[in-house]
């Protein structure tokens, strides 16, 4: 009997060890990530692990050489994918529609759909790929939330305020998440986003342009252009622009 219990415990431990590691709250650097060359350019893993909601949450940096393309063709059992254009320009073919997208533009891909990115710049172009999977996926919830879409940064509405301004991109349910909320903040030099605070939603701060101090739990971590900070649920945090020019970053939340 003891042998059976021991084997059972060992098997359970192996299952836990085989799962994704829990993502820690920290800044993950674009320039410090390991670069792997590909036939179309290169890739780098910014982070990969699990959180309170997602069993897999991964962010990759994808760089395509001039004229090169990359297609994502998914099925109904695939993960959700969210893309942010980091630099350069792309012709994006999403299902049966085409878009010309530049820095700050986004693409959301539901399982079962497909998208192709063609680098149209004179040189390299890059984008972020965010992969989301949940053990509590809900297809009906996701379908009610809307379809796959592309959003051009140039068409977003900028609302100014005393510290800078904000662009609210969307706030919707998805197959993997009860709520997926994204806005882009521009923060003027020497201002902070708000006093350090906590919230239930997990969050990513993705610095598109600028330099800041990301306060996490007990102290600051430097965040610069290209970096992504993962913040766990109920962790004290804020960001301060420590540069001499406005800082622009994505604030991505989900629950």
Image (cartoon, rainbow, N blue to C red):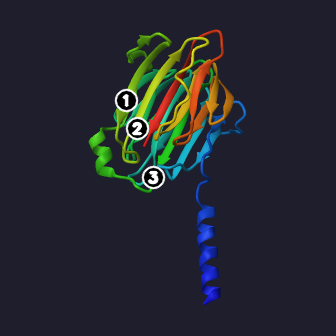
State left or right for residue 1 relative to residue 35. left
| Image coords of residue 70 (percent x, y) | 53, 37
Considering the numbered disc 2 on the image, is that residue within a helix, a strand or a loop? strand
CB under 8 Å between callouts 1 and 2? yes
Pointer 2: residues within 10 angstroms few (<14), some, or many (20+)?
Answer: some
Q: CA distance from mark 1 to mark 2?
A: 8 Å
Residue at 56% in and 44% down: 58
**Can see residue 53?**
yes
- In the rendered image, which residue does mark 2 sit on? 180
Q: Quadrant of residue 28?
A: top right
- In the rendered image, which residue does mark 1 sit on? 170
State left or right for residue 156 relative to residue 194. left
In front: 103, or 100? 103
User: Where, quadrant-wise, is the N terminus in this rendering?
Assistant: bottom right
* Picture layout, residue 98 above or below residue 138: above
In front: 167, or 155? 167
Mark 1 or mark 2: which comes first in sequence? 1
Q: CA distance from mark 3 to mark 1?
A: 20 Å
Mark 3 or mark 1: which comes first in sequence? 3
User: Where, quadrant-wise, is the C terminus in this rendering?
Assistant: top left
**Can see residue 227?**
no
| Image coords of residue 31 (percent x, y) | 71, 30
Considering the numbered disc 3 on the image, is that residue within a helix, a strand or a loop? loop
Pointer 1: residues within 10 angstroms few (<14), some, or many (20+)?
Answer: few
Where residue 134 is drawn, which disc sits there?
A: 3
Residue at 55% in and 50% down: 50
């Amino acid at each position: 009997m003891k042998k059976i219990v021991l084997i059972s415990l060992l098997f359970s431990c192996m299952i836990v060890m085989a799962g994704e590691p829990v993502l820690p709250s920290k800044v993950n650097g674009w320039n410090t990530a390991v670069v792997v060359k590909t036939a179309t350019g290169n890739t780098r893993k910014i982070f990969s692990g699990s959180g309170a909601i997602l069993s897999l949450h991964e962010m990759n940096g994808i760089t395509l050489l001039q004229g090169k393309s990359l297609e994502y063709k998914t099925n109904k059992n695939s993960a959700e994918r969210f893309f942010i254009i980091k630099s350069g320009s792309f012709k994006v073919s999403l299902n049966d529609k085409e878009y010309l997208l530049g820095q700050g533009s986004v693409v959301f891909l539901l399982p079962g759909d497909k998208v192709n990115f063609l680098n149209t710049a004179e040189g390299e172009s890059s984008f972020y790929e965010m992969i989301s999977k949940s053990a509590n996926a809900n297809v009906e919830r996701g379908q009610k939330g809307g379809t796959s879409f592309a959003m051009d940064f140039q068409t977003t509405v900028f609302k100014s305020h005393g510290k800078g301004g904000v662009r609210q991109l969307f706030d919707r349910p998805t197959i993997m998440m009860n709520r997926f909320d994204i806005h882009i903040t521009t923060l003027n030099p020497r201002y902070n986003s708000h006093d350090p605070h906590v919230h239930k939603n997990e969050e990513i701060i993705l610095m598109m342009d600028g330099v800041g101090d990301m306060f996490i739990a007990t102290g600051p971590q430097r965040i610069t252009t290209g970096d992504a900070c993962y913040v766990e649920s109920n962790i004290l945090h804020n960001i301060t622009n420590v540069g001499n020019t406005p800082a622009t970053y994505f604030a991505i939340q989900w629950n």
